[in-house]
């Protein structure tokens, strides 16, 4: 169980790093999908089946389709001749930062105690029902604000792209 968690964590971490450092936006989106699946696997290990299903259906499915649509709508291809090689100071800074993060991760993995597997849902109350009750009572406003925020971000990206084309 802990080995599977470590494997999924390594996949999530490495795909998250590749999302950030990938130059091509389409490949970055594909690595983000891989990250979503790894996180869903970790939710399954924590006995949060509903959250894992939502992670795959909503994030890896619907939202990533929306992101891919926006990427293709914006046509973010850059010609190869525009790419400038990084300066020596950027290379040194990047290597230093990468070594520091690697040492920090190694220290964290050696010192960390893995959490116990997730607790089962309370008797008589299913995991899905508990989440739905909390989501639509206590967290309704943040849930709706998040959906509006995603919509505003996508509309803003399209507006900025259209102004850039003129």
Image (spheres, rainbow, N blue to C red):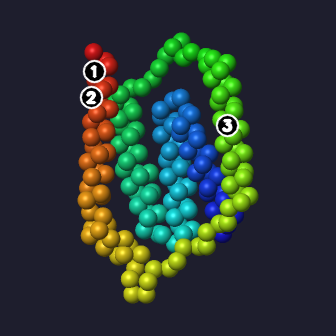
Q: Residue 67, image x and y in percent?
A: 38, 40
Task: Say which residue label 2 marks.
Answer: 159
Q: Residue 20, image x and y in percent?
A: 53, 37
**Residue sitting at x 35%, y 28%:** 74
* Image-based side of 42 in relation to 154, left or right: right
**Residue sitting at x 57%, y 15%:** 84
Q: Residue 35, image x and y in percent?
A: 53, 49
Q: CA distance from mark 2 to mark 1?
A: 6 Å
Is 99 in front, or is 18?
99
Select label 2 or label 3 by which is in front. Answer: 3
Is 42 in front, or is 27?
42
Q: Quadrant of residue 6?
A: bottom right
Q: Answer above or below: position of 121 versus 48.
A: below
Task: Say which residue label 3 marks.
Answer: 98
Q: Is label 2 in contact with label 1 (beta carbons under 8 Å)?
A: yes
Judging from the image, what secondary structure is the residue with disc 1 in?
A: helix
**Residue sitting at x 48%, y 69%:** 48
Quarter of the image where the N terminus is located: bottom right
Is 116 in front, or is 48?
116
Q: Answer above or below: position of 61 versus 31.
A: below
Q: Is residue 4 visible?
A: no
* Image-based side of 159 in relation to 21, left or right: left
Task: Say which residue label 1 marks.
Answer: 163
Give the class, few, some or many, for how many residues have Cα within 10 Å of label 1's Cα (few <14, many ≥20).
Answer: few
**Residue sitting at x 54%, y 69%:** 46
Q: CA distance from mark 2 to mark 3?
A: 35 Å
Judging from the image, what secondary structure is the residue with disc 2 in?
A: helix
Judging from the image, what secondary structure is the residue with disc 3 in?
A: helix
Q: Answer above or below: position of 20 versus 111.
A: above
Q: Residue 36, image x and y in percent?
A: 50, 52
């Amino acid at each position: 169980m802990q080995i599977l968690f470590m494997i999924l964590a390594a996949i999530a971490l490495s795909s998250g790093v590749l999302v950030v450092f990938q130059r091509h936006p389409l490949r970055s989106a594909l690595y983000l999908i891989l990250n979503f699946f790894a996180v869903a696997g970790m939710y399954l290990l924590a006995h949060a089946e509903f959250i894992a299903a939502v992670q795959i259906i909503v994030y890896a499915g619907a939202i990533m389709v929306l992101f891919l649509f926006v990427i293709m709508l914006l046509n973010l291809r850059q010609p190869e001749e525009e790419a400038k090689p990084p300066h020596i100071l950027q290379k040194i800074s990047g290597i230093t930062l990468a070594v520091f993060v690697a040492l920090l991760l190694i220290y964290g993995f050696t010192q960390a105690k893995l959490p116990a597997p997730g607790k089962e849902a309370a008797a008589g109350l299913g995991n899905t029902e508990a989440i739905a009750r909390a989501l639509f009572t206590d967290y309704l406003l943040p849930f709706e604000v998040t959906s509006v925020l995603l919509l505003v971000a996508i509309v803003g990206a399209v507006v900025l792209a259209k102004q850039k084309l003129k």
